[in-house]
Amino acid sequence: MNLLHALHREGVEHDAAQSDRLLRRRNLEPESAALLSVVLRAAGTRRMAEIGTSNGYSAIWFADALRAAGGDPLLSVDLDGAAQRAAAANLVRAGLADHVELRRADGGEVLRTLPDAALDALFLDSERTEYASWWPHPRRVLRPGGLLIVDNVLSHPDEVADFVQLVDADEEFGASTVTAVGKGLLLAVRG
């Protein structure tokens, strides 16, 4: 937990000094990460992907939950090679390097190539305006009962509005909610 605290603090300091939004870490907030860790553990999540690696902060939380369930390595996707190198180093520090597959690629392209029902959970925390163009793959890759998680739905509602509307209109998502934890999480369960 000391590593997670240090990574979060460093991320906040880095982002405050960085004027270019695309170069910020934009890590998940600790309260959001803790909530998702509990949810993933309670659900026994074994297969998960995250789109948006950053420095590996959320990957540490998720990989630890998957490992606790005896699951597969987390698939963590990001286009930024420097971010993935930082994530790789942080995963080594956390003792979780063997529990994460880091893939430098476009998130939408990766979702297109994943098999149907391949995942128990999918976490989206990257370029929010692109999510709607990835449809229907975020739904297709989730197994029935799988969990879709989207960060920043309250802090950047205009950027995710089209995607949230797609989820809300999709009859295959039997239950969904937006939580006011962190910057707002959309949680939706595929029927």
Image: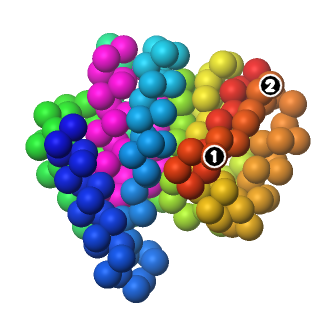
Q: Residue at x 74, y 53 (%)?
A: 163
| 10 lies above or below 32 | below
| The quarter of the displayed image where residue 116 is located | top right
Q: Amino acid at mark 2?
A: Gly
| 66 lies above or below 182 | above
| The quarter of the displayed image where residue 127 is located | bottom right
Q: Residue at x 24, y 63 (%)?
A: 10
| The quarter of the displayed image where residue 96 is located | top left
Could you say where residue 12 lies in the image, as x and y percent from the top left? 33, 65
Q: Which residue is mark 2?
A: 174
152 left or right of 107 in image: right
Q: Secondary structure at mark 1?
A: loop
Q: Which residues are magenta?
A: 46-69
Q: Badge 2: how crowded within 10 Å, few (<14), some, or many (20+)?
A: some
| 20 lies above or below 55 | below
Q: Nearer the viewer, residue 109 or 28?
A: 28
* 59 falls in the magenta region: yes
Q: How many marks?
A: 2
Q: Which residue is mark 1?
A: 180
Q: Amino acid at mark 1?
A: Ala
**Res. 130 visible in picture:** no
* 133 falls in the magenta region: no
